[in-house]
Image (spheres, grey):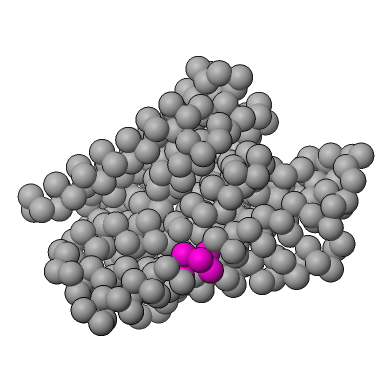
Amino acid sequence: MISIILHVLLLATGLAILIKGADLLISGASGLARRAGISDMVIGLTVVALGTSLPELTINLLASAKGASGITMGNVVGSNITNILLILGISAIMRPLSISRDFVRKEIPLNFLATAILLVMAMDPLLDGSRGPILSRSEGAVLVITFAGYIYFLAAFLEKNHGQEPTMPPGKSILFIAVGIPALVLGSRMTVNSGIHLAELMGISQALVGLFFIAVGTSLPELITSAVAARKGKPDIALGNVAGSNLFNISLVLGSSALIRPIPVPPLIYRDLIFLIIATFALILAYRTGPGRSISRAEGILLVSMYIAYILYSWYLELAR
């Protein structure tokens, strides 16, 4: 009983650190955006997205280094699905998210393209007759180069918002970002570790622990950051965070992991990749059908419902094996 209470306290502490870290990161990033004349969307796609993708990156690199690279593919794909359906869904429930035309014209197609590239790479046996599906080191290098090209694209085509009044000194903004990102990483680690120990102490199956805590746990920084951004009325940071994190996960996280050690492709990953494409397409539907070109609260509930259905179906398939 004492162990359960201890892990509940650690879980609550981890969540508190996450929330405060997200608040500092959003405030610092917004301050830099206004001072540099850079749009919130670009800041969300770069600084915030990379910062909130650090848990996936560190977990996957450690897993690859230890020879447990089999979990890395599912972690990234599951996190990306979580980002779109659960995170944007909860953010929209808190406050409807307005979707810009540039986001639909640039970021969604880039997410489609990255997912399609990963799907093709995972189909080695069908395309070249190889013995087993694997993400090789050469394919990992392609993904890392894609990440570098994406960063160059953002740097070359920065959206400028001239005429904005700075709201925070640059030193303070940098300090907030420098403190916020580690707080997100620390908070996510505390939350995930405490959740896993709680599950073991309470007798919850390992399959459920892996499905829920790893997928959702590594996406907690994105969840908290986007929710805080939505509450503060900054939809561009919420949307940019998710779109940028998904691109970072596929290109940088998977690419770096494959460079360390080739990644075996789980048989069910094709289903999850197709579902990820469907989830991305749902954002276009929200833009076309949503009131005022936004993800409404009703659509947010629909996204969360899709995520719950995905989790239940995946769990059912796992138990049926």
Q: Find residue 206 and report its image quarter.
A: bottom left
Quadrant housing the N terminus: bottom left
Residue 314, how many percent across, how many down?
Answer: 21, 47
Q: Residue at x 51, y 27 (%)?
A: 296
Residue 235, how many percent across, how many down?
Answer: 63, 39
Residue 256 is at least partly visible in this image: no
Front residue of 27/115: it is 27
Q: Which residues are magenta?
A: 14-18
Residue 67 as seen in the image, left or right of residue 203? right
Q: Tell me: residue 213, above or below residue 294.
A: below
Front residue of 92/174: it is 92
Residue 176 as seen in the image, left or right of residue 18? right
Residue 65 is at least partly visible in this image: yes
Numbered marks: total: 0
- Looking at the magenta stretch, what is its main secondary structure? helix
Q: Residue at x 23, y 68 (%)?
A: 199
